[in-house]
Image: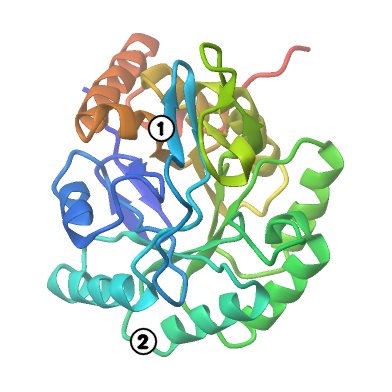
Amino acid sequence: MPTLTTKFHSHTFENPFMNASGVHCMSIQDIDGLAHSAAGSFVTKSATKAARAGNPEPRYLNLDFGSINSMGLPNNGLDYYLDDAIRRQQAAPDKAFVLSVASYEGFHEYVENMRTIQNSDYNGLVELNLSCPNVPGKPQMAYDFEDTHRLLSEITAFYTKPFGVKLPPYFDLLHFDQMAKILNQFPIKFINSINSIGNGLYIDAKTDTVVIKPKAGFGGIGGEYVKPTALANVRAFYTRLRDDIQIIGTGGILNGQDAYEHLLCGATMLQIGTQLEKEGLAVFDRIQKELLEIMTEKGYQSIDEFRGKLKAID
């Protein structure tokens, strides 16, 4: 029987599956559910310094082939998730997970949040979410290459614990080159690619209206719609980043074949968002079984036998 055992950074997981931050991780109770599910690990809600209620409802809708959202970073504040992370780490030091950190106010809040974690007892993995709402009138942090370099320079001057960055999707080969060149300069352990495709629009055909309230209906697109873009981003960064920078593949994972393709493109861990929201925690058990069936059919005993081995046409 093949194994889904996965090594990520210095940790070994029974399988590569996680939730995507923002789904089933708002409260400690939600996180408890993930910790006791079939997922190999989990990530917390992307936390800002202060708690946020987020954007007005309706702000999320499941669609036939994905989802649209403009959540506005609702979360219970960094201290809430950090205190819980420290408690979990002390209770079970061998069960690694990822603490996600965001900023609504911009550059200085990112730095302040990372300094808070540096000065805490938490020593686990941190995801620095560079793909979230930023200062009004400015792009997401990871779309500003100069600011991203400046931010990582300032953070790595004092931060000594393992961390990675969550990225938005890129659509130009030059942008892959530029971002990879920046990331390769810093001691990051992983990237998470991709966040939702920003500023999509979905129309209710019966009412001729948009389907979410914030931003006049503009929102991030997730699910099946984004899989080709997600695979392209995983592959582009896998072929450009240092070998020691691992990739969390996120976007459009509905079944075992989708998971297999993310791994084939070079991902090490896999996050599920839209389908988790639609199906609930049972999704992890189902997709694991489907991935194992594919591996058995192809004669693979472990993920490492095919990870990153996508073939090009001669």
Pick out the residue farthest to the front.
207
Residue 41 vs 172, above or below: the answer is below
Q: Residue 120 carries which label?
A: 2
Q: Residue 274 carries which label?
A: 1
**Horizontal and vertical percent for residue 258?**
45, 22
Left or right side of 160 for 85 = left
Mark 1 or mark 2: whose residue is earlier in sequence = 2
Q: Is mark 1 on a helix, strand or loop?
A: helix
Colouring rule applied to residues: rainbow
Residue 170 vs 162, above or below: the answer is above
Q: Is residue 223 visible?
A: no
Nearer the observer: mark 1 or 2; the answer is 1
Mark 1 crowdedness (10 Å alpha carbons): few <14, some 14-19, many ≥20: many
Q: Which amino acid does label 1 sit on?
A: Thr
Q: Is residue 164 visible?
A: yes
Task: Using the rendered view, name the quadrant where residue 134 is placed.
Answer: bottom right
**Horizontal and vertical percent for residue 208?**
59, 18
